[in-house]
Image (tube, rainbow, N blue to C red):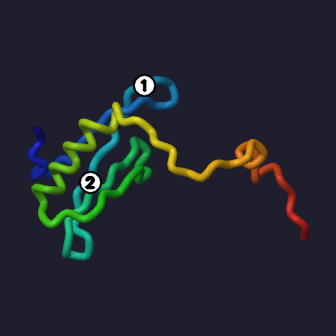
Amino acid sequence: MNSGFDDEPGQFLCLGDEGVMMAGSFELFRDGGISFRFRLKGPDGTVVAVSGPFSDKVSAVEGIDAVRECAGTGLITDLCPPMSHEAMAFDPASSTRAA
């Protein structure tokens, strides 16, 4: 278990476009000086997720460890309302707007 207290960001690996393993990272930070949070960043620096608040640093690091253990095997639960087939196939980039 990584202590999370060193200067190295937590690292995770994911597959890039060509099937090559690429490293992403967890960043641990203070939220307005009150709470601790972490963000999960993809290999390209894009923020993938931000945690809820933790009261202390140790709890935030434990949250990172839990994400590391569960994320790769987590199931997807779709809580979105049902959509029509037409709405799912809609491509806003191909529609034209009236001037």
> Disc 2 and disc 1: Cα gap in Å?
23 Å
Q: Given the image, on which type of amino acid does mark 1 rest?
A: Val
In the image, 99: left or right of 21?
A: right
Q: Residue at x 50, y 25 (%)?
A: 18
Q: Residue at x 38, y 53 (%)?
A: 49
Name the quarter where the C terminus is drawn: bottom right
Secondary element under disc 2, as helix, strand or loop, is: strand
Most extreme residue toward the front is 82
Q: Are marks 2 and 1 in contact (CB under 8 Å)?
A: no
Q: Residue at x 34, y 31 (%)?
A: 73
Counting labels gives 2
In the image, 71: left or right of 96?
A: left
Rendered view: 16 above or below 96: above
Residue that label 1 marks: 20
Residue that label 2 marks: 27
Rendered view: 22 above or below 19: below
Q: Given the image, on which type of amino acid does mark 2 rest?
A: Glu
In the image, 80: left or right of 90?
A: left
Instruction: Give coordinates of residue 20: x percent, y percent.
Output: 42, 25
As rendered, which of 83 and 24 lies closer to the eye?
A: 83
Tag shown at residue 83: none
In the image, which is nearer the foreground, mark 2 or mark 1? 2
Name the quarter where the N terminus is drawn: top left
Q: Name the image quarter holding residue 96.
A: bottom right
Secondary element under disc 1, as helix, strand or loop, is: loop
Mark 1 closeness class: few <14, some 14–19, many ≥20 residues within 10 Å: few
Q: Residue at x 26, y 39 (%)?
A: 68
